[in-house]
Image (cartoon, grey):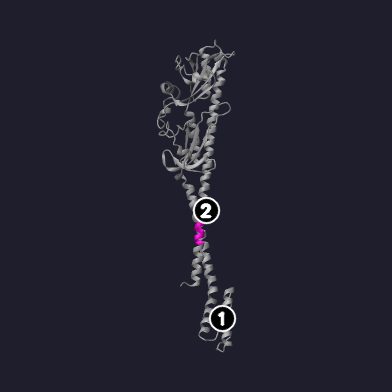
Amino acid sequence: MPRLRLALALGFGTLGFLAALALAILVSREATRRLEAEVGGQLAEIAGQMARSLDLGMFERWRDIQIAATSDSLRDPGAGTDAKRAVMRRLQETYPAYSIIGLIDPDGRVAVTSIGALEGADVSGRTYFQAARERPFVGDVHPAKLLQAVLAPAVHGPAIHEPPFHEPLRLLDLAAPVRDPDGRLLGVLAAHLDWVWARDMARSLEGSLRSHRGGAEILILSHDGTVLLGPPPLQGNRLPETVLSGGRALDPQGTSRVGPWPDAAAGYLSASARTNGERDYPGLGWRVVDGRPVNRRRQHGLQVAALRWNILAAGSAVALAAAVLAWLLAGLIARPLRDLAAAAGALGRDGPLPPLPRAIVREGAMIADALTGAADELARRGRPSAS
């Protein structure tokens, strides 16, 4: 059987180490949870900022077209083509993301454009023209199709589509009715806004995000979940619903999550925010989703690991101190017990009862009193003993 000193020292030391180990595990889990919540909150803030920027940018373009549609030069039948083109050129120079701006006559034929291209084209069947005859119109992102060959060289120059981008021209449609003072329809002012402005905005935010959170990506989805902006393999495809609602939520609203990512095997921390429009601009129901790989949390993972090892080291030191203290205390307890055991053995052999040690615990004193009482009882019965 192990000695009391060894048993107590091992027991206290083991208990202290196990307590430190449990504390390290609990603290590291809590630190990881809080870290995930912190990163998720930052991603949610970035997604919200991007959504607000998209709404504000579209509202400004929405307002530009409506203000330009009230220009006297556009509403004056006597104004020449050059005067009308000058109005549209000033607007395009103010905001170069406009690929082309044009005035369409009531029959749907392009009368004049900011860059001189497409004049005379029939657009009477286009949704933006038909809708804008009644009220201001905004249309979602779509490929430029026939306009690609005309607009890309004229507006962007060849460099915009050189590697690494290889992006087809994609446009948003903005249009507003042009009416005379009596409210009679004179035509429709339409603008095609290059989607590149949203891409540049997202890249700017991604750059800011990556400086703090490596590997970040930003996606923009249409109202039906189609990827409008993101990695080329994803663009034009529906984003799996698991990205938006799968995995584990990091906040009660489910704004940020830990879960799958469409083009990665590893899990991602992600957050999303919807665009809600701005003032009278109705919005297009876009959704911004940003995320970063879980395996990119290396720096913070090292911090959590360092915290865990620090707790284990401190706990081990405490456990060792507890074991040493238990060893010393057990020595103080065991020595009187050994003396009491020797006294009991002597008494059992009808020998004289040796002087009993002074016990430091009540149980030891009770044993000493019992031995003294036994010795007195033996003496009373006439058996030789020493008291």
Q: Dot 2 lies on which element?
A: helix
Amino acid found under the numbered disc labelled 2? Val
Q: Quadrant of residue 52?
A: top right
Seen at 51% across and 63% down, the residue is 15
Image location (x, y in percent) of residue 342 = 52, 81
Element class at badge 1 = helix
**Nearer to me, 105 or 347:** 347
Question: Quarter holding the C terminus?
Answer: bottom right
The residue where tag 2 is placed is 27
Q: Is the residue under label 2 in contact with that under label 1 (CB below 8 Å)?
A: no
**Percent coordinates x, y for residue 123 in the rendering:** 46, 17
336 up-or-down from 224: above or below: below
Count residues near mark 1 (Cα–Cα under 10 Å), then give few for <14, some for 14-19, many for 20+: many
Q: Residue at 49% of width from left, 60% of height from top?
A: 18
Q: Disc 1 or disc 2, which is closer to the eye?
A: 1
Say if residue 128 shows up in the picture. yes
Residue 180 placement (x, y as % from top left): 57, 13
Q: Quadrant of residue 179?
A: top right
Rendering coords of residue 74 (x, y %): 54, 15
Reply above or below: 339 against 90: below
Q: Earlier in the sequence, mark 1 or mark 2?
A: 2
Give amino acid for label 1: Leu
Main secondary structure of the magenta stretch: helix
Residue 2 colored magenta? no
For marks 1 and 2, give the CA distance.
52 Å
Residue farthest along the top direction in this orientation = 78
Q: Which residue is mark 1?
A: 371
Does the magenta portion include 22? yes
Q: Which residues are magenta?
A: 16-24
Closer to the camera, 73 or 41? 41
